Image (cartoon, rainbow, N blue to C red):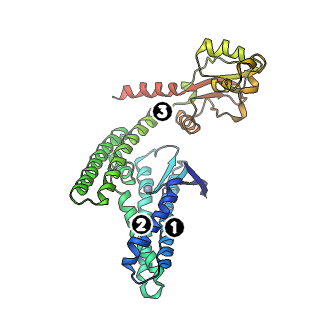
Amino acid sequence: MSLKVGRISGVEIRLHYTWFLIFVLVAWSLAYGYLPFEYPGQSNVFYWAIGFVASAVLFLSVLIHEVAHTLVAQRYKIAVNSITLYFLGGVSETAEEAHTPGAELRMAAAGPLMSIVLGVVFLGLWGIGPLIPLGAIAVFQYSSYINFLLAGFNLIPAFPMDGGRVLRAIVWGRRKDVLSSTRTVTSVSTAISFGFIALGFYDLFFFGGLEGLWLVIIGFFINSSAQASMNETRVGQALAGVTIGDIMTKEVFTVEPGYSVQQLRDYAFVARKHHGFPVVSGGELVGIVTEEDVRRVKPERWDEVRVQDVMVPAGKLVTARPGDAALDALIKMSKAKIGRLPVIDEGGKLVGIVTRSDFTGVIERKMSFRK
Ligand SMILES: [Zn+2]
């Protein structure tokens, strides 16, 4: 649901499709609802042009905010996979969470601090006043306001905002326990989300303002994200230090590339009740064949078509090594939307397989210890 637009510091920048709609919406609301009142007596072309320029500056401001997070994360050797810009802001997708409270504090605070700096810079430019064209003044004024708004919104001490991470880093630094700190901030976030929802409904009922609806939406957004942050931290903690070799199944039932589809059905799918099997030749992984691959073959051809003709070849497969971190492999699987990962050694030999249930097994075991 997003479009790749470029790379900064090795990180992929993506635009979510909803962003295009909002880009036009922001320009439109500025051209009709804001600029004619702030700067009366100008032409429609002026309002629209300034609306689009200001919308573009908003986009750049959000991007710079996210890049600030990224650069600090990279300094702490935390890989950032991508930055996606949504309608209300951006999300930097990191491979893992910060390892220390200090790192988390700096990573989380970098974005809002950058927004404050941008806000001050635009405020200064606006202050030059009469020396510059009216259009530039309008853009500077709006950009200053929007950057302070971005900083303020992101500093709300609730997940998934930066402020929630800042608060967790502070509690974590004192308590030295990331799980209990996350739980505390999740509770704070939930309380804040109810505050937003209550305030929103109050506004809707007594004033009928559109702001009320926004507050309700933000409230529900915080509420659901807080729970997701808690789960993410739990999973990260449970899988810390666990490798694929620790959790993979070593005894794997495999099939050979020369099997006919008929043989594959009889010996594998019907007898074993799995949905897919690694295809192995001389110990080496050459592909994976699933029920879906078989479904594409007409029953009258089951005897002549071979497994090698329908399987997904090894070159196109997502695989793991026994020494890989379990968390990385789990992220890899969910990104590729697959349920199993074949595990191979350096020589391409199949040494095991991991499925989603291997991960949930270890997560449940570790969490029952902590309760
Ligand atoms: Zn941020």
* Sequence-earlier tag: 2 or 3: 2
Residue located beneath label 1 in the image:
56
Q: Position of residue 351 (x, y in %)?
A: 65, 23
Is residue 143 in view?
Answer: no
Q: Position of residue 238 (x, y in %)?
A: 44, 32
Q: Is residue 107 left or right of residue 11?
A: left
Is 358 in front, or is 131?
131
Q: Is residue 99 left or right of residue 200?
A: right
* Sequence-earlier tag: 1 or 3: 1
Which residue lies at the image location 47% right of the left edge and 78% below the top edge? 44
Residue located beneath label 3 in the image:
239
| Amino acid of disc 2 | Asn
Q: Position of residue 268 (x, y in %)?
A: 65, 15
| Amino acid of disc 1 | Ala
Mark 1 vs mark 3, CA separation in Å: 41 Å
Q: Tell me the SS state at disc 2.
A: helix
Q: Is residue 253 above or below residue 81?
A: above
Mark 1, other Cα within 10 Å: few <14 / some 14–19 / many ≥20: some
Which residue is farthest bottom? 131
Residue located beneath label 2 in the image:
147
Is 118 in front, or is 144?
144
Q: Position of residue 139 (x, y in %)?
A: 46, 75
Foreground tag (2 vs 3): 2
**Quarter of the rendering occupied by the C terminus:** top left
Q: Is residue 215 left or right of residue 334?
A: left
Mark 1 vs mark 2, CA separation in Å: 13 Å
